[in-house]
Image (cartoon, helix red, strand yellow):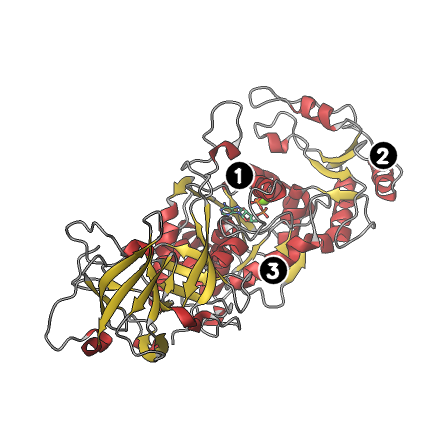
Amino acid sequence: MATDDTAATQTPLLISKDFIRDLIDEDNRAGRFGGRVHTRFPPEPNGYLHIGHAKSIHLNYGIARDYGGKFNLRFDDTNPTKEEQEYVDAIMQDVRWLGADWEDRLFFASDYFDQLYEWAVQLIKAGKAYVCDLSADEIREYRGTLTEPGRESPYRNRSVEENLDLFERMRRGEFPDGSRTLRAKIDMASGNLNMRDPVLYRILRATHHRTGDKWCIYPMYDWAHGQSDSIEGITHSICTLEFEDHRPLYDWCLDALGIYHPRQIEFARLNLTYTVLSKRKLIDLVKRGIVRGWDDPRMPTICGLRRRGYTPEAIREFCNRIGVAKANSTVDYGLLEACVRDDLNKRAQRVMVVLKPLKVVIENWPAGKVEWVDADNNPEDPSAGTRKVPFSGELYIEQDDYREDAPKGWFRLGPGREVRLKHGYYITCREAIKDAAGNVIGLRCVYDPESASGVTPDGRKVQGTLHWVSAAHAVDAEVRLYEQLFSKPNPDDTPAGQDYTANLNPNSLTVLTGCKAEPSLADLSPNPQYKDGIHRFQFMRQGYFCLDPDSTPDRLVFNRTVTLKDTWAKVEKGTKRA
Ligand code: ATP
Ligand code: MG
């Protein structure tokens, strides 16, 4: 049986190199970092990871792996009001699940707070930073605009001694939150707003998830990020395009301190149709109860995609196919689904589950007899073997597979019609049983004992093949069908005055109860076929599904991972699609 690969055996899949690898090759040729390649993934633990982060992880980890370099996981935890241990734990689990391995290199920017403080003091001593008493609003006002230069803070020319004293007292907690900041002294007339004396430290009394109440001043992202890269010996600091304008500041800080200087390279972030990838909106969806949680299978979070049944292999393949570019664009969600289908088609076990059951009684079946028929687990992979499925005189088929007024070209059941039951026998419908309102509530059929395993001695053609489940052996199941969470390709495309939730798809979740699954599915122990232990299936003719953690032994719960592209043609070659 095919099992998923481990991080160590992942082959470099990139056929053509991207521009980042080209730049790294250039650096290596020039001997810039002594031929070293060291990357990192630097999440802020203020939410769960999503498919966009997967792109960044795959890029950073993939580069380290392909160049025989190193990869760090570093939490950019400089904002204690929004960060939590829950997010740290979830992020680590998700990065691992995606197949990236940071070995023993797990770091936190908060581990560098002492060093960052010392470097700030060094900057003050060099006359390159000052304590400013302007409020946040005033700082914004003084900053100017893209077309107008900023104005210098009245506190800009404080003496080094005064700055050292005030900064030390900021740290000791002598001043209220927000009353003072430490700012870099760069250039209030710079064309780049990030260079107009950016704030390096703010006063904030908040308990940090790792440093507790040790600090009441916290470094800003721009002061922490480059120096963290430097401390860790990162060679290529790969980030998304919105940081391009921060690069001069990144470079300025490292040069002002005279410390080891990595190279920042920007790439375009992933955008997906029908999907929001802003952390703020994802948090909003969870907090407002619009979805059932971070791991709701409709969420583009890694844990949501995992619960939905997506595999890390499919996500990595998606990252390979989209590549890396320097210009922003939006990827069609269908591409991600295609990668999931391709992977599951190769690996997912084929099983039979009836979503909307209709009872079939086979009148000529010997009373009480049960025949365990052989069913192949995956026609795409003979090594997947076979299993036994019980066939008996009372079965369930899909309601949709019977029609009284069968149109031309209908190859399923109808009055007097014959079909093949997959892995079982041919049956012919004799009579429909109806309730008082005339609804069909059951079928009486006969089977052909000569048609075992779909073979008929007289060679007659039976066009349709149905899936089925033995009634006495069936396990009850709930099946959750998903559609896109949003009904517009761009969820932010809303009428004036409405937010993105105006575009929520009211049909994003359909719950089917009373479904009937073949008994082999009542196995809740971890599935050894996949490293994450998740049971993934192709429900014949229905799509790909996975077992949800809400399952109990007598009530299974399944999530539809993705629909089948070509529902029936593949299952029954030479049969017209019904
Ligand atoms: P925010 O900074 O608003 O909290 P973020 O999505 O940038 O949100 P981070 O935790 O800072 O979250 O992201 C970690 C890394 O993942 C960063 O290097 C960032 O550039 C990258 N990243 C985030 N979103 C995407 C995306 N959609 N596509 C590719 N990379 C992304
Ligand atoms: Mg960010």
**Which residue is at a point 64% across and 62% down the rendered structure image?**
106
Note whether ligand 1 is within 8 Å of mark 1.
Answer: yes
Find numbered disc 3 in the image and state the secondary structure of the residue it sits on: helix
The correct choice, above or below, for 387 with respect to 117 in the image is below
Q: Tell which of 76 and 454 is nearer to you.
A: 454
Question: Which circle marks residue 176 in the picture?
Answer: 2
The correct choice, above or below, for 563 with respect to 346 in the image is above
* Crowd rating for badge 3 (residues with CA inside 10 Å; few <14, some 14–19, many 20+): some
Whole-percent x and y of residue 213? 83, 49
Q: Amino acid at mark 2?
A: Pro
Residue identified by numbered label 1: 242
Q: Tell which of 257 and 364 is nearer to you.
A: 364
Find numbered disc 2 in the image and state the secondary structure of the residue it sits on: loop
Q: Tell which of 22 and 15 is nearer to you.
A: 15
* Crowd rating for badge 1 (residues with CA inside 10 Å; few <14, some 14–19, many 20+): few
Find numbered disc 1 in the image and state the secondary structure of the residue it sits on: helix
